[in-house]
Image (tube, rainbow, N blue to C red):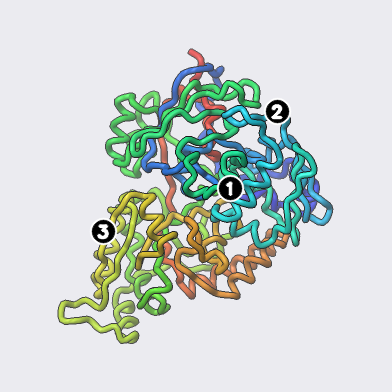
Amino acid sequence: MDRPISLCSRRELLAGLGAAVALSACAPASTPAPTAAAKAVAKVGGTFVIAVGTDPGPLNPAISTSGALHFVAGSLYNGLVGLDEQFRPEPDLADSWTVSPDGKAFTFKLHPGVKWHDGKQFTSADVKFTFEELLLKFHSRTKTGVEPVLSGIETPDDLTVVFNFKQPYAPFLQQLNVIEAPILPKHLYYGSDPQNNPVNLKPVGTGPFRFVEYQKGQRVVMERNPDYFKPGLPKFDKLIFQIIPDQATAVLAFEKGEVDYVSLPGSEVARFEKMPGVTVGRSAAGSGGSYCVATMIPNGERKPLERPQVRQALNLATDRERLVKQVLFSQGRAARGPIASTMWAFDVSLPAFTRDVAKANVLLDEADLAKGADGIRFKLTAVLPTTMAKPAEVLKENYAEIGVALDLKLVEFNDANQTVFVKKDFDLGYASYCNGPDPEIGVRRAYDSANIKPVLFSNGASYRNPKVDEIFTKAVAEFDREKRKVLYAEAQKLLVADLPYLWLYESEGAFAYRSDLRDLRPWTSSLAEVAWSAK
């Protein structure tokens, strides 16, 4: 489904990735056909209320790859480039860019006159600072891919930024949008701890909307930025992100007209598709938050999970088909490995995981992990977000069949992430590892041994395999996508054999919105262009 534009050919990369390419080679998954409202004239003004299921936490998208955070913060900030529906780069903070003939230097010309929401001038110094002090230290996807191959960033003047690489780096332009590389103000973060800076709770960006209010667990409110550098944008006067953790409550709020956009559980899709005045869409391929694989994270530095046969036993006990049917209501599919099966880099030769409880018990017997008088071999503590309550119960039943007692600790989403990725205080954790349009963007971060750090959505399993590291390094410098696919296939086979993670299912999120909304761009997190249709 996903076809990263920057990898279609070396010729196009060196030409600056600006030309259109054949859609058969580079088009992403199709999105719903535009409604009549989407084709109508936009109305300027009004309020858009969006139901979100998870509190975004501190509104600093440069230090986390949380989908909940980026969905909210994407309208406060900008990246150097945007991505269109075919993942072609388009101007954002940068008006234009060139790539050196050897593919090692990317030069960006910034838009003049851009201001931060507090009135300060945006310059190339903000870009350099954001990468060096924020993204390359804390943003898991950007850090893992860019940091090892970047040799330096130059700012010859206030409106020019040059990124110099040690080697050709094919997917770079796809890592520069507001999701992968949001630019933050140097004057407010310089000399501070960016993870605890008070500005995170009162953010200042360059984006189409300005921050108004954040009430933890309740709402985030934004207002139109009257000084936005893109004429005619944004269309709405106000955005309200209403935090409603319970899906049933969120669905009811939509039906009562209290919110205009809501994520749908699989059980509600068919009913909503019949509702007049409502449009149902499915999550389109986009930047980092696409091709998501729900994943259990065994702590590879704790006994007995450091042993491959133990992870194999847990894998064999996992009932993926039941999870797909009972949790997703068949809005997705059983995972087959670290890369989503709908993505271009997926190795189609990988067999499906089969459930075999008897074999799992044999493996644990052979590992000298015998059952006690109570039928329990060992206990594991699973630290999971409350949104994982249903799948957690299925897994608890699955593992009980092989004598593994699962102690479930269901906590708030951001607390779960801190416990697993930063504090490392868990046996089993969870993440929805989204692949993004390229394995370098969303896959590598979970397996590269250099990414075993207290960074959100990094290598949470503390997995180490030098051969896997080597393959990812080779693949990123290769411009022929067929050759890249061969390398990624090799990596997938090694990973499936090692089982550093337990890949559960590939989710396909559905959402509903009022049919008189127009210009919704589900592949990006910015809401600058969305508007009500003029009556």
- Tell whether 213 sits left or right of 33: left
Q: What is the three-letter code of the residue carrying label 1?
A: Gly
Residue placed farthest to the left in the image?
373
- The residue to which callout 1 is attached is 191
Q: Badge 2, how many Cα within 10 Å: few under 14, some, many 20+?
A: few
* Residues at marks 1 and 2, CA–CA distance in whole angstroms: 25 Å
Q: Find residue 211 and report its horizontal and vertical position in percent.
A: 49, 30
In the rendered view, would you say 478 is above or below 288? below
User: Quadrant location of residue 178?
Assistant: top right
Residue nearest the observer in this picture, 214 or 293: 214
Q: Mark 2: which secondary structure?
A: loop
* Residues at marks 3 and 2, CA–CA distance in whole angstroms: 54 Å
Residue drawn at 47 percent across, 35 percent down: 202
Whether residue 448 appears in this view of the structure is yes
- The residue to which callout 2 is attached is 113
Q: Earlier in the sequence, mark 3 or mark 2?
A: 2
Observer-side mark, 1 or 3, equals: 1
- The residue to which callout 3 is attached is 393
Q: Earlier in the sequence, mark 1 or mark 2?
A: 2
Q: What is the three-letter code of the residue carrying label 2?
A: Gly
- Tell whether 50 sits left or right of 193: left
Q: Mark 1: which secondary structure?
A: loop
Q: What is the three-letter code of the residue carrying label 3?
A: Glu
In the rendered view, would you say 130 is above or below 233? below
